[in-house]
Amino acid sequence: MTPSTTTVVVPTVGRPTLAVFFSALARQSRPVTAPVILVDDRPSGPDLAQWLAQEVPHHGLDVRVLRAGGGGPARARNIGWRHARSRWVSFLDDDVVPDRDWYETLADDLARAEARDCVGSTGRVRVPLSGHRPPTDWERSTAGLETARWITADLSYRRDALSEVGGFDERFPRAFREDADLALRLGGERRILDGARWITHPVRPADDWASLRQQAGNADDLLMRAVHGRDWHRRAGAPVGRRPRHLAVSAAAAVALAGLVARRRAVALAGLAAWTAGTAELAWARIAPGPRDTDEVRRMVLTSAAIPLAATYHSARGALRHRGARPWRGLPELVLLDRDGTLVHDVPYNGDPALVRPVDGVRESLDRLRAEGVRLAVVTNQSGVASGRLTREQVDAVNARVEELLGPFDVVEVCPHGPADGCGCRKPAPGMLKRACAETGVDPGRAVMIGDIGADVEAASAAGVSAVLVPTPATRAEEVAAARRVAPSFAAAVSSIMAGEW
């Protein structure tokens, strides 16, 4: 297997480490021929592609920049892999440094994964630490990446496997637990092979309160529990952590406060003593292994006083927010689209491109899907060809005008047959939808159809595709009543799909 069978996807927030990353990628022992998709996850800012062109020499790398708009690393990775067209997708972080033989070894790792019918391949991570003193609390936390399972700092997945489960769960808003969640949904150790390639993950600078902000991950742990059950720690190889102790220390603080408010001195002192003991135990557990210099001790004492409360708050927030959460489904990979009455106003037997008028809001909605990497296919009945009212050349000219006005489509399927021809492609038959799925390589279960009449919905059902009906004055009342999902407009249909309702 050649390494060009993969696409390298890198989410970024524009860190200065990008220059180091691309320099390492450009100096590989085997030239990188795989496309590189850099997903800019800043909410706003100047065009990262221009910055790269000016500041970072690509050395012949095929780099494409996409925007994610600040939705978090899970969403950025999803946008990246959905735009990829290779069999494999290799995720790297923007602050890692691949070894010089990383790309060459990646090819061997993916070949071994294919031979064993695995869906994933992990890289190996080294975290360089200072050798002249014990590591700080922050450095020890980063060093934990060396033994963590399935971290996306360097992880390759088969694209069809990502599509099957909808990719990364975007309910994880930070780079924490979204990797373990995806790995468990894909089969965990049974289907993800340890690779031989290496990256270096330097310790990023951190301020005094970095460990306090990390407590937001407790909410993500509650999402993991809701989706994967109480034993998810064991299956993911993740430490259980100190959440019960944090809860106890927080309860002691609450008792002290309640006693103070009620003017019950004994209760307040008991709660304060318990809180002080718990805080001191946590602080010492973090101070003892470290350098114990003045700055480190100060940081540990200050943050240890606040960490139990923060952890308890985020745990409660996660428990409430993710109660009853189900496994992630994500966006569809393919949206199938009726043409007349859905994308453009219906002109019966139209063979004149000048008469094409898009439905209001359709172009903007299609562009929303394109930006997410969702593929688009038009499936249209054109019985006027069979009846002699149209030529195929006229149909193609109208379709070209539709694309000119609404943007490109991955597939355009046309049925030229009449109702009495008995073909398998004319809707409500599923032929065109099945062909579009086959041509794009998308499982019908990961596709959704948008149309304006019952035949569109029936064709989707016969093809194993979900459907959303957008009624027009031509839609019969019984068709609306029979449809499982109905939207008042094309834009509303796309919004519901984007929200996972498909």
Image (cartoon, rainbow, N blue to C red):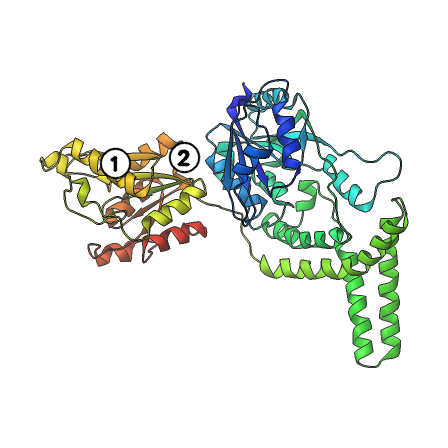
Where the N terminus falls, by quadrant? top right
**Mark 2 residue type:** Val
In front: 462, or 364? Answer: 364
What's the residue at 80%, 62% (across, down)? 249
Which residue bears the numbered disc 2? 442
What's the residue at 37%, 49% (across, down)? 365
**Residue 210: image x %, image y %?**
74, 51
Cα distance between the residues tagged 2 and 1 = 24 Å
Which residue bears the numbered disc 1? 400
Q: Is residue 9 visible?
A: no
In front: 488, or 453? Answer: 488
| Mark 2 vs mark 1: in front | 1
**Which sits earlier in the primary sequence, circle 2 or circle 1?**
1
**Residue 282: image x %, image y %?**
84, 54
In front: 334, or 113? Answer: 334
Q: Is residue 428 visible?
A: yes
**Mark 1 residue type:** Ala
- Say above or below: 265 vs 234: below
* Tally of marks: 2
- Say above or below: 84 vs 322: above
What's the residue at 13%, 33% (across, down)? 391
Secondary structure category for the residue under label 2: loop
- Say above or below: 223 vs 101: below
